[in-house]
Image (tube, rainbow, N blue to C red):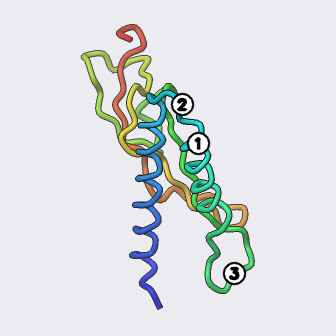
């Protein structure tokens, strides 16, 4: 039987690579056919991962928080602040997405996003 920590890390690595591909696609023209493949990979990770011995719906979901507001009470991101102001911050770059593991009705954060934030008035 595979070590559950290694299996989880492998899934996280896959999702981080899918995220990177999706980021690169956003700057390409004519990326529709590749985007379909990325969407299929995301769908597989969300719906086709089955926990051993369980009938609950399980899977991994990632979220790109680009453009969202950021404050120090936010627990799903680790941020580096670009600039001097620490008020009215917005996420301007996402290095790694938020990844959640869905098990039945519960969503557990298994990876915090790594982001860069800036004050909105400096954008």
Residue depicted at 35% across the width and 9% down the height: 122
Distance between the alpha carbons at the discs numbered 1 and 3? 35 Å
Residue 51 image offset from top left, x and y in percent: 62, 77
Q: Residue furthest bottom?
A: 1
- Residue 81 in picture, x, y percent from top left: 29, 27
Label 3 environment density (alpha carbons within 10 Å; few <14, some 14–19, many ≥20):
few
Whether pointer 3 and pointer 2 mark residues with C-beta atoms closer than 8 Å, the reply is no
User: Which residue bears the numbered disc 2?
Assistant: 30
Taking the spot 47% from the left edge, 56% from the top edge, the residue there is 15
Q: Earlier in the sequence, mark 1 or mark 3?
A: 1
Q: Is residue 122 left or right of residue 109?
A: left
Give the residue displayed 42% in from the left and 21% down from the top.
89
Say few, some or many: other residues with alpha carbon within 10 Å of mark 2 (under 14 / 14 to 19 / 20 or more). Answer: few
Q: Give the residue at mark 1.
A: 33
Instruction: Give the residue number, with chain letter if any, for mark 3.
Output: 54
Residue 58 versus residue 69: which sits nearer the camera? 58
Could you tell me residue 119's position as x and y percent?
A: 37, 16
Element carrying mark 2: loop
Q: Which secondary structure, mark 3?
A: loop
Q: Which is nearer the N-term, disc 3 or disc 2?
A: 2
Q: Quadrant of the C terminus?
A: top left
Q: Is residue 48 above or below residue 17?
A: below
For residue 74, above or below residue 55: above
Q: Residue furthest top?
A: 121
């Amino acid at each position: 039987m595979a070590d559950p920590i290694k299996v989880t890390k492998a899934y996280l690595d896959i999702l981080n690579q899918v995220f990177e591909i999706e980021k690169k696609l956003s700057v390409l023209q004519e990326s529709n056919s590749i985007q379909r493949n990325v969407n299929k990979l995301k769908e597989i990770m969300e719906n086709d991962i089955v926990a051993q011995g369980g009938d609950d719906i399980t899977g991994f979901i990632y979220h790109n928080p680009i453009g969202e507001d950021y404050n120090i009470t936010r627990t799903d991101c680790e941020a580096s602040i670009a600039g001097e102001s620490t008020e009215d911050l917005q996420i301007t770059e996402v290095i790694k997405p938020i990844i959640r593991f869905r098990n039945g009705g519960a969503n557990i954060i298994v990876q915090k996003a790594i982001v860069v934030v800036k004050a909105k008035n400096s954008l």
